[in-house]
Image (cartoon, helix red, strand yellow):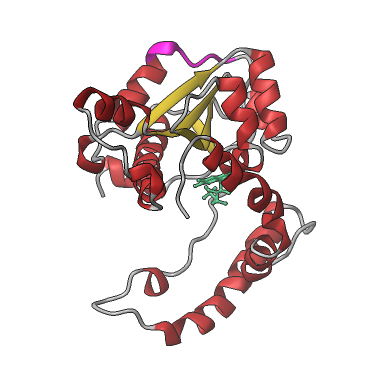
């Protein structure tokens, strides 16, 4: 196994950081430069990352993202934004209509570009011995991020990334078996129910071990609950804030 595959397979999200140990500006530049060297849609480079270190600003963002204390604890909070502002300037410069932002395609393009950059930043940071946790919780209150970070029209925060030195590294969370997630030639829907039954048991005993018996809930109940009312604040706030940034899909 090569070193990159080892880093990828060793991933775990870290939520306890050493607040005293710094991450330098050079380290962040290395991470983001590497992340943005990846593929992106039509070389439009629809991603901008905001590096936040100022404690009061971090604290306000931590609150807006659902009181996630690890955002305050770690020295750096990166906010990955999909960014069509430069594309709008390109349209103006060339005297063309800026149609993409009237279509859902803009969200698919921007989210894919951010996803690739975020994933690469995770690997770059982990390869440097740093710990990370992505923060999609920012979409509970994306308007607060738009305001605090001064995001212009056509720029929207998709996910944060907390970066710091781990104080505690948790055990690895087991994944679904590959037979569910890597299918050959065509999708076989029939196999999924049985796999979920097995995986529910795997996650339940994993969680029980990780929390000393305090939480033994399973995978399907967590997912079901989130996509029922756990999703409520995102449903209420995310789409209106996207539209407020002038993405006008129907
Ligand atoms: C886009 C994205 C957003 C996430 N948002 C949060 C978040 O707001 N808070 C959090 O604690 N973890 C967040 N996570 C981390 C996931 O919960 C975590 O990756 C998942 O449970 C698997 O655990 P692992 O990363 O330790 O393997 C996010 C992950 C992704 C990819």
The answer to if 25 sits in the magenta stretch is: yes
Where residue 134 appears, x then y in whole percent? 53, 39
**Is residue 167 visible in the rendered structure shown here?**
no
Q: Nearer the viewer, residue 36 or 45?
A: 45
Q: Nearer the viewer, residue 245 or 219?
A: 245
Residue 36 sits in which quadrant? top left
Quick one: which residue is furthest to the bottom in this view? 190
Where residue 198 appears, x then y in whole percent? 56, 77
**Is residue 150 visible in the rendered structure shown here?**
yes
Image: magenta residue range: 21-26
89, above or below 217, in the image = above
Q: How many marks?
A: 0
Where residue 177 appears, x then y in whole percent? 44, 70
Residue 24 sits in which quadrant? top left
Give the main secondary structure of the magenta stretch.
Answer: loop
Residue sitting at 60 percent across and 36 percent down?
142
184, above or below 136, in the image = below
Residue sitting at 39 percent across and 41 percent down?
119
Q: Nearer the viewer, residue 121 or 9?
A: 121
Residue 76 sits in which quadrant? top right
The answer to if 217 sits in the magenta stretch is: no
Where residue 138 appears, x then y in whole percent? 61, 37
In the shown orientation, is residue 32 left or right of residue 201? left
Residue sitting at 63 percent across and 64 percent down?
223
Residue sitting at 23 percent across and 22 percent down?
93
In the shown orientation, is residue 67 left or right of residue 96? right
């Amino acid at each position: 196994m090569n070193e990159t595959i080892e880093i990828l397979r060793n991933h775990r999200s870290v939520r306890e950081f050493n607040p005293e140990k710094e991450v330098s500006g050079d380290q962040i530049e290395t991470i983001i430069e590497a992340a943005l060297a990846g593929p992106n849609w039509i070389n439009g480079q629809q991603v901008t990352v905001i590096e936040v270190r100022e404690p009061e600003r971090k604290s306000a963002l931590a609150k807006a993202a659902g009181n996630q204390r690890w955002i305050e604890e770690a020295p750096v909070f990166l906010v990955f934004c999909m960014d069509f502002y430069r594309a709008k300037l390109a349209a103006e410069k060339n005297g063309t209509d800026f149609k993409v932002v009237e279509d859902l395609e803009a969200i698919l393009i921007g989210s894919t570009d951010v996803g690739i950059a975020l994933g690469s930043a995770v690997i770059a940071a982990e390869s440097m011995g740093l710990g990370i946790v992505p923060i999609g919780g920012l979409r509970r209150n994306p308007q607060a991020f738009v305001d605090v970070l001064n995001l212009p029209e056509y720029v929207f925060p998709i996910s944060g990334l907390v970066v710091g030195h781990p104080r505690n590294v948790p055990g690895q969370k087991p994944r679904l078996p590959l037979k569910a997630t890597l299918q050959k030639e065509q999708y076989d829907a029939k196999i999924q129910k049985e796999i979920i039954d097995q995986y529910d048991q795997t996650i339940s005993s994993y969680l029980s071990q990780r929390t000393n018996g305090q939480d033994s809930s399973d995978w399907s109940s967590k997912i079901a609950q989130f996509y029922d009312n756990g999703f409520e604040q995102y449903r209420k706030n995310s789409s209106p804030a996207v539209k407020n940034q002038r993405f006008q899909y129907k």
